[in-house]
Amino acid sequence: MNFTGKTALITGAASGMGAATAREFRAAGGQVVIVDRNEQLAAQVAGEIDAGLPVVGDVSDPAFCAHAVETALQRHGRLDVLVNAAGIIVRADALGTTDEQWQRVMNVNVNGVFYMSRAAIGPMKQQGHGVIVNFGSIWGSVGAAGVVAYCASKGAVHQITRAMALDHARDGIRINAVCPGEVNTPMLASERSQPVTAELMQRIAESVPAGRLAEPVEIARVVLFLASDAASYMTGAMVNVDAGYTAR
Ligand SMILES: NC(=O)c1ccc[n+]([C@@H]2O[C@H](COP(=O)([O-])OP(=O)(O)OC[C@H]3O[C@@H](n4cnc5c(N)ncnc54)[C@H](O)[C@@H]3O)[C@@H](O)[C@H]2O)c1
C-alpha cells in the first residue's frame, strides 16, 4: 500500500495500536499527525517516525478535536484519513463502576470518536473524499463480564460508524471500524486490581481460538487496508480482527 501524498491524523498514536498504525502509515509514505494526551510518549513516537510535533490534548474536548483537524490541514493542506484509536477501559461490573468512571469511558471512547469525526467530515466533504477508521472492539459486538462501561462504549462506536457511513456515503467519505480481539498493548494490563502475571496472560491467550494475543501491527495492517483504495467499496463495516473470537 502506498500513501505517498496523503495525510493521516491518528488519535491515541502515542501507544499500542495507534502507534503501530502511525508507524505503518509513515512506512507506506504517508504524512502523519500524531494526536494523544500523553505528551511524552507522543513526542517519542513522533520523533521516531519523523511526524512533526504531536498535537497534545484530550479528544473528549470538542474544541481540541477541531484544533487537531485544523493543525493537520494547516500543516499538510489536506486530510485524507482519520483514525480514531484513542480509548480507555474500566474493568468493573455495574455495582463497581462509579459515575465518574462511567462518564470518563463514555467521554473518551464515544464522545471523542464523535467530536473527532465531526471535525474531520467537514473538510473531507469539501475535498470530496476521505476515510475514517474507528477502533471498535469484539466487546462492542459480544458481551464480556466485568467491563460494562467499555462494552457499552464500543457498541456505541459501532453504531456511530454505521450511522455516519450512511450519512456520508455519497460525499466520497468511507467510514469503517476495525474491531480487535485481545491485543498485546499497554491497555491489556491497565486498570487491573492485580498485576499482570504470565499465568493471566496465558489465560487470556487461551480464550482466543488461535491461542495467542495479536501484536499491534497485525491490527494496524488492517487499518491501512481499510484506509486504502483497495477497500474502495467498503463503508459501514465492522471488521473483526480477532483470530476467531467472535466466530463462535
Ligand atoms: N488492547 C486490546 O486488546 C484492544 C482490543 C480491542 C479494542 N481496543 C481499542 O483499540 C484502541 C487502542 O487501544 P490500545 O490497546 O492500543 O491502547 P493503549 O492504551 O496502548 O493506547 C491508547 C492511547 O490513547 C491515548 N488516549 C487515551 N485517552 C485519550 C484522550 N482522552 N485523548 C487523547 N488520547 C487519549 C492514550 O494516551 C494512549 O496513548 C482503543 O480504542 C481500545 O479501546 C483495544
Image: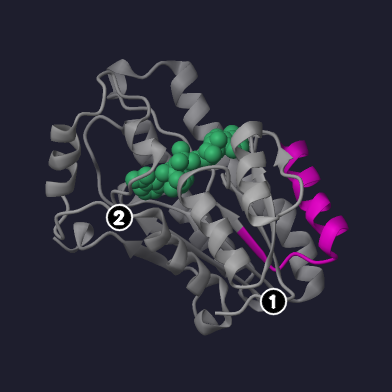
Is residue 161 part of the magenta span, yes or no? no
Q: Is residue 163 visible?
A: yes
173 left or right, relative to 99: right
Return the disc, 1 or 2, that comes first in the chain's sequence: 1
Write the residue at 49% across / 62% down. Answer: 162
**Can you identify the residue that label 1 sits on?**
4
In the image, residue 127 lies at what x, y percent?
80, 73
Q: Residue 1: x, y in percent?
A: 54, 79
Q: Which mark is residue 214?
A: 2
The image's colour scheme reads one colour
Locate residue 208 relative to residue 113 in the image: left or right.
left
For label 1, the crowd category at 10 Å Cα-Cα, with few meaning under 14, some 14 to 19 and many 20 or more, is few
Q: Main secondary structure of the magenta part?
A: helix
Q: Residue furthest front?
A: 48
Magenta segment, which residues? 62-82
Residue at 25% x, 19% y: name it: 194
Q: Marks 2 and 1: in contact by CB < 8 Å?
A: no
On screen, residue 10 versus residue 209, left or right, reads right
Residue closer to the observer: 193 or 121: 193
